[in-house]
Amino acid sequence: MIAKILITLIALLHVYFLVLEMFLWDKPAGMKAFGNNAEKAKLTKVLAQNQGLYNGFLAAGLIWSLLAPAVYATALANFFLACVLVAGIYGGITASKKIIYIQALPALLGLIVVNLV
């Protein structure tokens, strides 16, 4: 049950990222969340939308793991949580250290809990 709650929270977090990156990137909420100004947001909007789409795929995969038959659920959860972990580590190294805490750490915790059961 704890694993499913964590997976749900991580999936919702990635839906939130999708919304911020695809629809709010150049709006006040998106610019504040990512520390951008209007000029930078305009220049990077298409890249952010692409990134948001990928976050949506991660969310979809995590949701799939929650709905899949038990025989597949753990493997799906492991795969998509590992993808989130790798993306979070990479983002933490290349973009902002806070991504480690916002994205990678929850995924690592999710992987641990999923595999303790």
Image (spheres, rainbow, N blue to C red):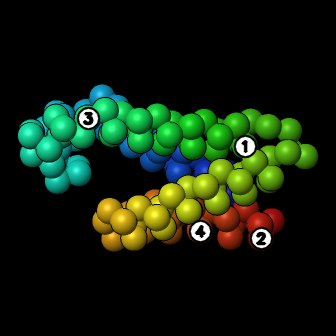
Image quarter (top left, top right, bottom left or bottom right) of the C terminus:
bottom right
Q: Secondary structure at mark 1?
A: helix
Q: Mark 1 or 4 closer to N-term?
A: 1
Q: CA distance from mark 2 to mark 3?
A: 40 Å
Of circles 2 and 1, the one toward us is 1
Would you call the spot at circle 3 few (<14 residues within 10 Å), some (14-19), or many (20 or more)?
Answer: some
Q: Residue 106: horizontal and vertical position, in percent? A: 52, 63
Of circles 3 and 1, the one toward us is 3
Instruction: Name the residue tied to disc 3.
Output: 45
Q: CA distance from mark 4 to mark 2?
A: 11 Å
Q: Residue 94: horizontal and vertical position, in percent? A: 36, 65
Q: Mark 3 or 4 closer to N-term?
A: 3
Instruction: Name the residue tied to disc 1.
Output: 65
Judged from this view, the residue extending furthest toward the top is 23
Instruction: Answer above or below: position of 100 versus 27.
Output: below
Q: CA distance from mark 1 to mark 4?
A: 16 Å
Amino acid type of the residue that numbered disc 1 sits on in the rendered structure = Ser
* Left or right: 43, with 59 as reference point: left
Q: Residue 113: horizontal and vertical position, in percent? A: 69, 67
Q: Secondary structure at mark 2?
A: helix
Would you call the spot at circle 4 few (<14 residues within 10 Å), some (14-19), or many (20 or more)?
Answer: some
Amino acid type of the residue that numbered disc 2 sits on in the rendered structure = Leu
- Whether pointer 2 and pointer 1 mark residues with C-beta atoms closer than 8 Å, the reply is no
Q: CA distance from mark 3 to mark 1?
A: 30 Å
Quarter occupied by residue 114:
bottom right
Amino acid type of the residue that numbered disc 4 sits on in the rendered structure = Leu
Instruction: Name the residue tied to disc 4.
Output: 109
Q: Mark 2 or 1 closer to N-term?
A: 1
Q: Secondary structure at mark 3?
A: helix
Q: CA distance from mark 3 to mark 4?
A: 31 Å
